[in-house]
């Protein structure tokens, strides 16, 4: 067991939250866009076979535009939602001092103080720029890497996470 203790002062801004929210939503976005496109294309092909239109191999131009527009509109709405949500989260968040230790993760800010054991976390995921801590399946908070002193501190944290989270961690090598 490691006795290392890593303390980081986190003061995440809208850019940090936006990046993590986008990471969280990206798979859903791609699946939704592809499924929408496939369903609309299937409907379009069916409609083109039962009508006498000769435009674009039986597909009417209006329908082609609709097929291409709906996934783009959905993507735009999601992007705007993530943008606004990140801004709101940044406005209400306060700087926190987070300590990772062999007993768990402690957080102290002007508004709260928590101490959570490793076994209480659902998972921790590492991305290129963040550690994303999931206390519950769909509840998460970012720990941006740019708040760490150096790469040695990040490597120490990864070792600590591997020790205590095991299979519940997805870390880069």
Image: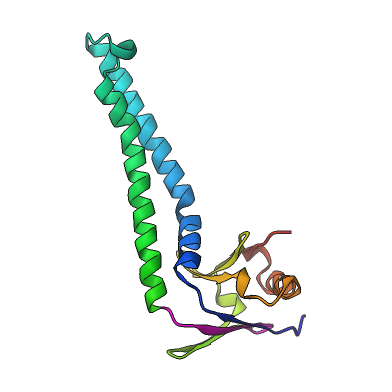
Percent position (x, y) of residue 117? 59, 82
Quick one: 128 or 166, which is closer to the camera?
128
Q: What's the magenta region?
A: 93-104
Residue appearing at x 70%, y 72% in the figure: 154
Quarter of the image for the C terminus: give it. bottom right
Percent position (x, y) of residue 112? 45, 89
Residue appearing at x 22%, y 8% in the figure: 52
Tell me: 119 left or right of 38.
right
Quick one: 135 or 9, which is closer to the camera?
9
Quick one: 116 or 32, which is closer to the camera?
32
Residue 23 lies in the magenta-colored region: no
Tell me: 47 left or right of 30.
left
Which quadrant of the figure has residue 125? bottom right
- 150 w.r.t. 129: above or below: below
- 132 w.r.t. 106: above or below: above
Residue appearing at x 35%, y 62% in the figure: 84
């Amino acid at each position: 067991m490691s006795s290392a203790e890593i303390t980081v002062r986190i003061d995440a801004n809208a850019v940090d939250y936006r990046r993590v929210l986008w990471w969280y939503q990206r798979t859903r976005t791609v699946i939704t866009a592809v499924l929408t496109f496939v369903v609309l294309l299937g409907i379009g092909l069916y409609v083109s076979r039962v009508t006498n239109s000769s435009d674009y191999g039986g597909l009417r131009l209006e329908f082609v535009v609709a097929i291409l527009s709906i996934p783009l509109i959905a993507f735009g709405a999601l992007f705007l939602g993530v943008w606004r949500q990140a801004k709101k989260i940044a406005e209400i968040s306060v700087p926190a001092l987070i300590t990772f230790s062999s007993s768990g993760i402690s957080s102290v800010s002007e508004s709260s103080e928590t101490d959570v054991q490793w076994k209480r976390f659902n998972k921790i995921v590492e991305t290129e720029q963040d550690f994303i801590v999931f206390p519950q399946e769909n509840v998460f908070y970012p720990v941006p890497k740019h708040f760490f002193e150096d790469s040695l501190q990040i490597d120490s944290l990864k070792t600590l996470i591997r020790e205590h989270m095991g299979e519940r961690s997805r870390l880069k090598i």
